[in-house]
C-alpha cells in the first residue's frame, strides 16, 4: 500500500517530470549536435575529372575541399594523356558530403 501511495506522491511526480524533461532536452541537443557534426543537408557535386592530369585533379578537388585516392588499375587507353584520370568513382554529377 505504501508503494502505491509513493507513486502518487508529489515528490515522485516532480522527479518523474524532471527526468522526462531532461531526457527530452538531451535528445534534442544530441540531434542538433549530430546535424552540425555530420553537415546534415550539405552536399557537393562531383566534378568531371576524365582526361584531367593528376596535378590539375589535385587543384580542382582542393578548391572543393574534397579528397581523392589514386588506384593503379593497369587499365591503359591510348586516347587519354599520360597521368590522367581514366575512370572515377563516384561518377561526375553525383553528390558527396
Image (tube, rainbow, N blue to C red):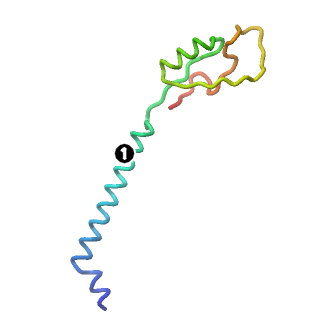
Which image quadrant is residue 87 in?
top right
77 up-or-down from 65: above or below: above
Front residue of this view, candidates 71 and 14: 71
Q: Is residue 5 left or right of residue 90?
A: left
Residue 80 image point, x, y percent: 72, 9
Residue 62 image point, x, y percent: 50, 19
Can you say which quadrant of the picture contains the N terminus? bottom left
8 up-or-down from 30: above or below: below
How many tags in the picture? 1
For disc 1, the marked residue is: 32
Residue 89 image point, x, y percent: 64, 26
Q: Of all residues shown, which one is farthest toward the left?
A: 10
Front residue of this view, candidates 81 and 48: 81
Q: Is residue 12 left or right of residue 28?
A: left
Q: Of all residues shown, which one is farthest toward the bottom?
A: 1
Which image quadrant is residue 22 in?
bottom left
Q: Residues within 10 Å of mark 1 (few under 14, many from 20)?
A: few
Residue 77 image point, x, y percent: 77, 13
44 up-or-down from 41: above or below: above
Please name the residue shown 43% across and 36% down the image.
39
Which image quadrant is residue 24 in?
bottom left
Amino acid at each position: 500500500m505504501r508503494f502505491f501511495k509513493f507513486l502518487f506522491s508529489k515528490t515522485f511526480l516532480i522527479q518523474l517530470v524532471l527526468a522526462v524533461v531532461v531526457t527530452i532536452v538531451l535528445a534534442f541537443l544530441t540531434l542538433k549536435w549530430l546535424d552540425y557534426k555530420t553537415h546534415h543537408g550539405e552536399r557537393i557535386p562531383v566534378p568531371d575529372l576524365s582526361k584531367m592530369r593528376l596535378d590539375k585533379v589535385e587543384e580542382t578537388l582542393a578548391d572543393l575541399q574534397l579528397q581523392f585516392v589514386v588506384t593503379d588499375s593497369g587499365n591503359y587507353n591510348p586516347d587519354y594523356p599520360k597521368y590522367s584520370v581514366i575512370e572515377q568513382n563516384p561518377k561526375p554529377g553525383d553528390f558527396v558530403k
